[in-house]
Amino acid sequence: IIVGSIFLSTDALNVMWRLALPALVVFIFALWDDYKRLPAGIKLIGQVLAGVVLIGLGTYVHVLQPGFLGLRNEVLIWGNWFITLFWIVGITNAFNLIDSMDGLVVGVGSLALLFMILVTLVSGQPPLLQIITLLLGICLGLGFNNATPARFFLGDSGAQTIGFLLAAIAILFTPGDRPQASSWFVPIMIMGVPIFDTTLVTLSRLRRRVPFYQAGNDHTYHRLVQAGLDRKRAVTVVHLASVVLGCLAFIALNLEPLYANSMFAVVFLIGLVLILWMDRKL
């Protein structure tokens, strides 16, 4: 990142340091966890702290606009901060949870960055585009050494940092002249695979009264292997799912709000059905 920053514009550098500082917080806590297993609460504190730093540097969602339900602006700001923390912590953990096989996280992260490049080209955000392109190059380099047979492993420090940066980039993305009603779910769909996997594992473990943060072989990848796919094919299926969701997100960005939201609703329902089916059958 430091070497690549040389080629960034001044505006991109201003955005980069607002992402790099909180990402460093996540990396330090996750590296500490890689070295010495930390309790789930300590890891959560590190992620929340990174989210607070991100918000303090001016990066947070603006979902709740003035006038919403007649609430005071102070309440709306706190609400936006809470949504930001929920998104940041959720996506950071989602990428950490899917780290079940060589190349899985890097592949999903690279595909997410690729589709973020496409939607950012449409929205017209050159500084953010430069940063995403830099991160994609880094992920592709990591993928070369993390693919089976892996020369090194990402660990929590790698997976969580990738997830955090993607979550923060999604917040910075704005649709440009596209309707907000057609674009609010675009980052959700682009990162739909880790969101799907986290939801599947969380609901499955809650139903079985197992701590959701506990390591296990009940992730999407593991269930595909248990269904008869070999490891490489299971990873490929996960990556293909990321491609399909990314393409649908890009298509939705160019649709009228009614059709775009209808598409998202259909994808959401299909995902919910798959979660219920996989939890019972696989």
Image (cartoon, rainbow, N blue to C red):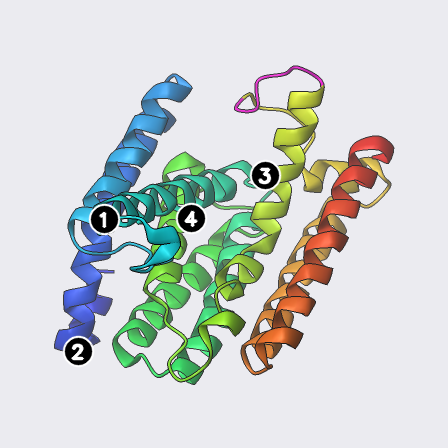
Q: Based on the displayed image, in which of its 4 quarters is residue 25 positioned?
A: top left
* Horizontal side, residue 115 vs residue 226: left or right: left
Q: CA distance from mark 4 to mark 2?
A: 24 Å
Q: Is residue 206 magenta?
A: no
- Label 1 vs label 2: CA separation? 21 Å
Residue 179: image x %, image y %? 47, 78
Q: Earlier in the sequence, mark 3 or mark 4?
A: 4
Which numbered marker is on residue 267? none
Please tell me whether mark 4 sits on a helix, a strand or a loop. helix
Q: Earlier in the sequence, mark 1 or mark 2?
A: 2
Q: List the residue tagged with mark 1.
A: 54
Locate residue 239: give its quadrant: bottom right
Closest to the observer: 16 or 264?
264
In x, y percent, where is residue 110?
49, 62
Asked if the residues shown at circle 4 and circle 2 are in contact, with their CB atoms under 8 angstroms apart, the answer is: no
Q: Which residues are magenta?
A: 208-213
User: In which quadrant of the rendered view does residue 18 lie?
Assistant: bottom left
Question: Looking at the image, which residue is at 30% across and 75% down?
Answer: 130
- Percent of width and height locating residue 101: 61, 41
For marks 4 and 2, the one nearer the N-term is 2
